[in-house]
């Protein structure tokens, strides 16, 4: 069995995905560098016995806690429980290639200014989107996957993700299901819990804050297969509302509110909302009513947040 690196902790939120967890654990035990601990924060039916059996005979310590559902909530609890210098955030429906941890650790030693604080791996079997789709999505700032070595963060938090860069490259933000951060990056930062339960784009929002003080890189040699389990997913209408609110939340917290940016956000929002409605109607067959309910709920979340912000500003002025 490979040697254990005592600096490495795996942080894994889960909820009712026992079968998916088996494949993940098999791939974890085949790593060329093993973690010192696996921190599992479980919001569903207990998988503690499954984990104990799988790790029996290995030198990987299991830290297991139950939690209320919430991806950000669970990851934050995992951060508090983990003891390693490097925290690997992964999803329970992933299968790692054997050198995933080893190649990720190598990238932390690259000479960059500021130092490398986060390393994102590559997903296999995710080709770039077609040229026409990339052009339209880039025009509206909607997230998509592209070839080449140039990632981009758009006005409302959409990202031009790289399919597989030719080398280790700096990137503006990282996807949390396949990223490792130095513990020092998280001394003053946590995942925002702005969405209860199943979250969306909380990884981008955290990465923007971390990137102010650290370099984040994409390591193409650290590879995994994200199998996107259907278990625990929200309905499409709910997803629409979460996407809409998360884009507003990112813009309201991380972008200047000058006229140019406001127009750019409105343009991006109109394009992504149309895209979400189109996918629901024509690709997923969700039906018009659930999609429109999702849009309405998304706007309600945005307006409620805007109202809270106005009240806070008025209160601060009075003080």
Image (spheres, rainbow, N blue to C red):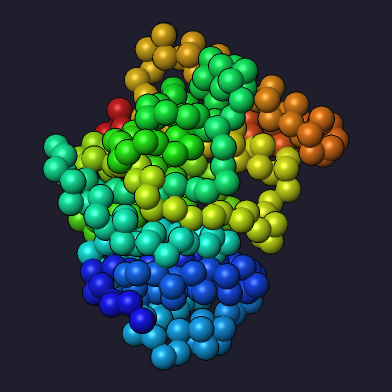
Q: Can see residue 125?
A: yes
The quarter holding residue 279 reads top right
Residue 80 vs residue 107, the one in the foreground: 107
User: Looking at the rendering, in which quadrant would you find the N terminus?
Assistant: bottom left
Q: Residue furthest bottom?
A: 57
The quarter holding residue 284 reads top right
Q: Position of residue 207 (x, y in %)?
A: 35, 42
User: Looking at the rendering, in which quadrant would you find the C terminus?
Assistant: top left
In the image, residue 101 sits, relative to residue 275, either above or below, namely: below
Q: Position of residue 240 (x, y in %)?
A: 67, 37
In the image, residue 115 sits, relative to residue 100, either above or below, namely: above
Q: Can see residue 301?
A: no
Residue at 42%, 28% in the rendered image: 148
Residue at 29%, 36% in the rendered image: 170
Residue 298 vs residue 89, the one in the foreground: 89
Residue at 50%, 48% in the rendered image: 123
Q: Position of residue 181 (x, y in %)?
A: 30, 54
- Asked if residue 182 lies left or right of residue 252, the reply is left
Residue 113 vs residue 147, the one in the foreground: 147
Q: Position of residue 157 (x, y in %)?
A: 46, 31
């Amino acid at each position: 069995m490979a040697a254990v690196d005592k600096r490495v902790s795996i942080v894994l939120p889960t909820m009712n995905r026992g079968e998916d967890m088996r494949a993940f654990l098999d791939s974890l035990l085949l790593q060329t560098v093993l973690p010192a601990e696996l921190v599992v924060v479980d919001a569903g039916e207990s998988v503690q016995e499954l984990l104990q059996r799988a790790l029996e005979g290995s030198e990987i310590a299991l830290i297991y806690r139950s939690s209320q559902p919430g991806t950000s909530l669970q990851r934050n609890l995992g951060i508090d429980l983990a003891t390693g210098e490097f925290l690997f955030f992964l999803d329970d429906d992933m299968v790692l290639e054997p050198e995933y941890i080893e190649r990720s650790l190598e990238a932390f030693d690259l000479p960059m200014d500021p130092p490398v604080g986060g390393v994102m791996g590559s997903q296999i079997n995710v080709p770039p989107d077609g040229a026409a789709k990339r052009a339209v999505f880039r025009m509206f700032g909607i997230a998509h996957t592209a070839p080449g070595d140039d990632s981009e963060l758009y006005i409302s938090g959409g990202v031009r993700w790289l399919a597989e860069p030719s080398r280790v490259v700096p990137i503006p933000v990282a996807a949390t299901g396949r990223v490792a951060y130095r513990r020092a990056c998280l001394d003053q930062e946590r995942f925002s819990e702005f969405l209860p339960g199943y979250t969306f784009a909380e990884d981008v929002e955290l990465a923007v804050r971390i990137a102010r003080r650290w370099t984040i890189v994409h390591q193409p040699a650290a590879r995994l297969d994200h199998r996107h389990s259907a278990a625990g997913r929200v309905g499409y209408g709910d997803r629409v509302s979460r996407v809409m609110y998360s884009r507003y939340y990112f813009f309201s917290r991380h972008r200047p509110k000058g006229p140019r940016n406001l127009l750019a956000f409105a343009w991006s929002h109109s394009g992504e909302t149309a895209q979400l409605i189109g996918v629901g109607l024509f690709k997923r067959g969700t039906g018009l009513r659930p999609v429109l309910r999702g849009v309405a709920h998304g706007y309600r979340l945005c307006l409620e947040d805007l109202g809270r912000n106005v009240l806070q500003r008025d209160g601060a002025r009075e003080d």
